[in-house]
């Protein structure tokens, strides 16, 4: 983690897959919502160089660094909003940390909310924008079930909401099959 820096140059958009990892989340029911959204986004769209994708299941210090470097952040995650299972909710700015309280980062005790707070301190201020695209999870049926039907039906709408948010930030995603100048980098766990 970055410590005692004078300034961090924030740039670009960071798209975060909440949960415990892009490939393993299919084992944990609706906790795999964020991972599935990112996989679908990358399968349908080319992202500009200014957009990067990262999984929250990475080492907490690395996640904090990535969050601190980003000017704008979109987080896909399964979040208990107290709504009907499968409900899609989009939250922005100040409401996001409270909604992410209790959502762990990988195998650590750090929550996504705490990671955002640490990133704000590390960078010397908050990012220009934070958007949470969350799905109300269905009750878990046990280990190994993959996404519930209600969460799976929200992956496409969540991806489209992300693309619209990126467009508002002048960071346009281009549908596959169309020419694009750059492709997002999928950051490995040890980046």
Image (cartoon, rainbow, N blue to C red):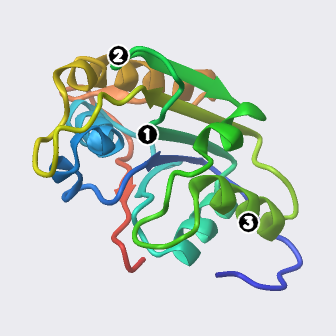
Dot 1 or dot 2, earlier in sequence: 1
> What residue is pinned by disc 1?
77
User: What residue is shown at x 68% (from left), y 60% (from top)?
Assistant: 114
| Foreground label between 1 and 2 | 1
Q: In which quarter of the image is residue 39?
A: top left
User: What residue is shown at x 83% (from left), y 81% (from top)?
Assistant: 5
> What residue is pinned by disc 3?
118
Q: Where is residue 146 in the image (x, y as percent from the top left)?
A: 14, 41
> What residue is pinned by disc 2?
157
Q: Is residue 144 left or right of residue 117?
A: left
In the figure, 159 relative to 14: above or below? above
Label total for image:
3
User: What residue is shown at x 72% (from left), y 63% (from top)?
Assistant: 119
Q: Distance between the residues labelled 1 and 2?
A: 13 Å
Q: What element carries label 3?
A: helix
Do tag 1 and tag 2 residues touch (Cβ < 8 Å)?
no
Q: Where is residue 154 in the image (x, y as percent from the top left)?
A: 30, 19
User: What residue is shown at x 54% (from left), y 70% (from top)?
Assistant: 109
Q: Distance between the residues labelled 3 and 1?
A: 19 Å
Do tag 3 and tag 1 residues touch (Cβ < 8 Å)?
no
Q: Distance between the residues labelled 2 and 3?
A: 30 Å
Q: What element carries label 2?
A: helix
Q: Can residue 25 be seen in this view?
A: yes
Q: What element carries label 1?
A: strand
On residue 98, which mark appears?
none
Q: In this view, does 35 lie to the left or right of 93?
A: left
């Amino acid at each position: 983690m970055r410590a005692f820096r004078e300034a961090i140059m924030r740039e670009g958009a960071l798209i975060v897959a909440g949960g415990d990892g892009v490939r393993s989340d299919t084992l944990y029911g609706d906790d795999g919502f964020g991972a599935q959204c990112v996989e679908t986004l990358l399968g349908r769209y080319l992202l500009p160089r200014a957009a990067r994708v990262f999984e929250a299941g990475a080492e907490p210090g690395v996640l904090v660094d990535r969050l601190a470097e980003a000017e704008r952040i979109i987080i896909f995650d399964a979040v208990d909003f107290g709504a009907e299972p499968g409900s899609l909710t989009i939250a922005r700015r100040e409401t996001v940390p409270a909604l992410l309280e209790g959502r762990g980062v990988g195998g650590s005790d750090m929550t996504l909310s705490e990671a955002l707070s640490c990133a704000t301190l590390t960078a010397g201020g908050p990012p220009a924008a934070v958007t949470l695209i969350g799905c109300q999870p269905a009750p878990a049926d046990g280990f190994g079930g993959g996404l519930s039907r209600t969460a799976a039906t929200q992956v496409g709408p969540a991806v489209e909401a992300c693309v619209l948010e990126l467009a508002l930030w002048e960071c346009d995603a281009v549908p596959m099959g169309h020419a694009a100048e750059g492709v997002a980098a999928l950051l490995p766990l040890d980046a």
